[in-house]
Image (cartoon, coloured by chain):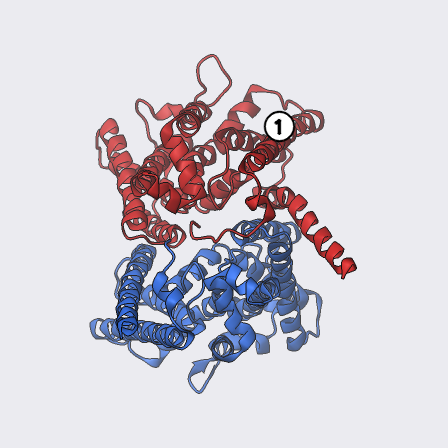
Amino acid sequence: MSSETPVIDEQELGLVGQRRAFSARSLIRWEGALVLLFIFSLIYGGSTTTDFFSKDTIFFAGINFGLIAIMALPEMLIITTGEIDLSVAAMLGLACATFGYLFEHHVEIFLAMLITLGVGALGGALNGFLITRLGLPSIAVTIGTLTMFRGLAEVILGTNELTNFGGPWTDIGTNTIPGTPFAWTFGIFVVLALIYGIVLHFTSTGRSIFAIGLQQEAAFFSGIRVKRIKFNLYLISGIVCAFAGLLYTYQTNTSRYDAGTGLELNVVAIVLFGGVSIFGGRGTMLGVFLSVIAVGTFDQVLTIKNVSSQEQSIVFGVLLLASVVIPNLPRGYRAVRQRLVSRTAS
Amino acid sequence: MAIDNATVVLERGKSHRVAETLSRARELAIVLVILVIFFGTGIKTSGFANLTSIQQILTNASLFVLLAIGETMVIVTRNVDLSVGSTLGISAFLVGDYYTHNPHPSVVLAFVIGIGVGAVCGSVIGFIVTVAKVPSLVVSLAGLYIIRGILNIIGLGIQIEPSVIPQGFQKIGYETWAGIPWIFIVPAVVALVAGFAMRSFRSMREFYAIGSNPVAAQLAGVPVARRVFTAFLISGSLAGLGGVLFVSEFATVNATAGTGYELLVVASCVIGGVAIFGGSGTVIGAALGAILLQLINQALVVTNVSPFWDPALAGALILVTISFDRLLSNRAALALRLKDSAASVK
């Protein structure tokens, strides 16, 4: 991603201040659109289904979408640096299998959780090492580790399915936060999103992440430790995804190697739909948060209306496409008009 | 990635020769690995190194070889097509549907339908990528969801049975000619034609120019948009052809046909030496990569190593090959730079 050659564009050559104002305005517009989609989903859901505004709906929306949402947070930071991590869902699967295996072998539950998170850290470190120290393209590396993590999960568990995870902690997957209708998974997402948002937008590390995404070489020469930051992002991504794997196990009360298969593309899609540029350097945590809320709600409406999840994918695809095509329309329009003008002039 | 000074300074002839040698060496290396694994497995397991297993491996690999050819063209232009699995699925389903509703079907028409469906999918994605100037990763990801969604709507709960597929058509899937399965002859011919075209045709050479440096290619007068569109069109059409072969191989189709193929196809290309950021790689290499992946799969089955190891090993193989590639290209670049500075001293 990071090697993407910048397209020569008058906009880029113009005054920096002007450009920033332009992009800030378009970002607000994008987030506004997400809020509109959210409100639309609420109205649509409320008017076409009974009991939409019930505790169950809110709970299940949190359960169904929470894991994608949690994995989207580290993914957002990685995409902002101009890289990508496609191994997130495979790490969820590996963590799920590891935890199940340990639980089956009567390892004490806290120790099992710690080891699982350790496996996540190892996986993330492997990604980070290959990408930053060997300088390999992240998309190829993470396709490799995706296959490998999923494969290791299969080696650990085979096609067995382990169930019955009793014990302390495990009910956080199926209970609500006391006094609220929200699932714990959703609560954890909100807290993590807050932490991620603060780090990204209010610390120097966050500014560095944007700088790396905009111009990696320039960031390096201005003293930003590009490799270290990227490595840490992959490391944290591994840990967070392993944590999501634990939540998956608690939620479904099962451990299986194919947990979360294919979710990596949903995670990337949800980040991009939040207005984050695939080339890095642009995006806000608020956008990703709103994208999660809006798409999660819409998803829930469709689920209640008995639209199968396979059919929902079409909605997802259209939204994703719209999220990249619409912001590009003004530029495309300008280019076409310019060509027409120059043609009539000659 | 840093701009490689050595390659910029080089005159055309020399760099062309070096690239040629590198890719030749790469293809030879894969052939060697394939031979070693094949005969190694043969020594360990009696009755493996025979014609039947070769036919089995080639049959299994044929769809992936076909998809990898189109994917190579797209990746060489510094794009990626993640929609191939869905395109193959919808093409396979519509071909099956054609057989279901026509008591007197024609094989030619089945091929026309399959390739036509694929061409439509590929050209829509190519059109959006080139006209709206949107990153292909996002567009083809959206395409993956939308095409699969459409397939789910038209094919929900429908299973096309082998009884409606004519025997003559199914023969493509299991009959052989001179020992080679028919189903492999199709991708092999396509690979030879495409390999020749990408070596010798000016328009196809321009794929490499675009992938090496899109801006430079544009300024040098290469019709970038048209070429990228062509690459997507070919990729889609080949995925469509893959759908036809899918029906002849399995004789049964439902809405999940081809799910998850996209990442395996990209992995085949990467193993085959196609640089993920474009500009280098050959069709033959990618085809060999696809065969290697299938060979590993088959070898694990017969050596009674748990087949669960297959994806884990495939993932490790991807990581090893890209690391090795980086090592080789670093050394080549260094050698060139030294040679170059020696020449300028003279």
Chain represented in blue = B
On the image, the x and y values in percent for residue B227 come to 58, 66
Residue at 46% of width from left, 63% of height from top? Answer: B212
- Tell me the shade of chain A: red
Please identify the quarter of the rendering in which residue A202 is found. top left
How busy is the neighbourhood of tag 1: few (under 14 within 10 Å), some, or many (20 plus)? some
Chain letter of disc 1?
A: A
Label 1 sits on a secondary structure element that is helix
Residue B209 as seen in the image, left or right of residue A44: left
**Residue type at the position of mark 1:** Val
On the image, the x and y values in percent for residue B293 come to 36, 65
When the figure is inspected, residue B291 is found, relative to residue A38, above or below; the finding is below
- Point out the image quarter for the C terminus of chain A: bottom right
Residue A155 as seen in the image, left or right of residue A24: left
**Nearer-the-camera pick, B305 or A237:** A237
When the figure is inspected, residue A258 is found, relative to residue A36, above or below; the finding is below
